[in-house]
Image: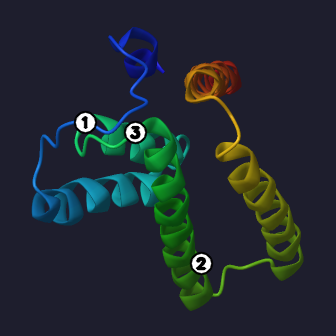
Amino acid sequence: AIYFLFSPRPAIEEGEEKISGNKYQNIVIPSIGFYDGMFGPGTGSFFVLAGVALKGRGLVHSTAIAKSLNFATNIASLIVFLTAGKVIFIIGFVMMGGQAIGAWLGSHFLFKINPKYLRVLIIVMCTGMLVKYAISIL
């Protein structure tokens, strides 16, 4: 949220890459995936931030790619939980249905929204999650 709030421009257009594709794939993405496995909240925002800040992608492009990366980390988590025998299938199916509906709606909305509004939405959602988790700790 802080990055998107104070970045000098809305990060709408494609920009200059600051890291090689090899380093991005072998260091950045696995690091965010590790964070997702250990803690999790805001992983999609970290993928978006990495795409914009390190790969120079536009905000919409980075958000679209973040969806597939987040899906991949969720599949990895599912495999770990299945292997450990720690899956409550009914809750998983309900969550999967909600995720599918949200992903479909979000993907259709993503390409219709003005990227400036998307930036505001990212800031609001990140801040809201931070407040929610801060309150739950207290």
Which residue lies at the image location 38% right of the left edge and 33% below the top edge?
A: 13
From the top left corner, tell me how far across and down residue 82 is, in percent.
Answer: 61, 87
What count of labels does the image hold? 3
**Badge 2 amino acid:** Leu
Q: Can you tell which mark lies on residue 44?
A: none
Mark 3 lies on residue: 58
| In the depicted structure, whether residue 13 falls above or below residue 83 | above
- Say whether disc 3 or disc 2 marks the residue closer to the N-terminus: 3
From the top left corner, tell me how far across and down residue 8 is, in percent.
Answer: 32, 11
**In the rendered view, does 99 fall on the left or right side of 29?**
right
Mark 1 touches mark 2? (CB < 8 Å): no
**Badge 1 amino acid:** Gly
Mark 1 lies on residue: 15
Which residue lies at the image location 79% right of the left edge and 55% below the top edge?
A: 102
Pick whichever, 78 or 59, lies toward us: 59
Q: Secondary structure at mark 3?
A: loop
**In the rendered view, does 96 fall on the left or right side of 125?**
right
Circle 3 residues within 10 Å: few <14, some 14–19, many ≥20: some
Q: Can you tell which mark lies on residue 78?
A: 2
From the top left corner, tell me how far across and down residue 94 is, in percent.
Answer: 89, 69
Mark 3 touches mark 2? (CB < 8 Å): no
Q: Secondary structure at mark 1?
A: loop
Circle 2 residues within 10 Å: few <14, some 14–19, many ≥20: some
Mark 3 touches mark 1? (CB < 8 Å): yes
The picture quadrant where one finds residue 114 is: top right
**In the rendered view, does 13 fall on the left or right side of 66?**
left
**In the rendered view, does 7 fall on the left or right side of 134?**
left
**Badge 3 amino acid:** Gly
From the top left corner, tell me how far across and down residue 111 is, in percent.
Answer: 65, 46
Spatial CA distance of label 1 from label 2 is: 35 Å
Spatial CA distance of label 3 from label 2 is: 30 Å
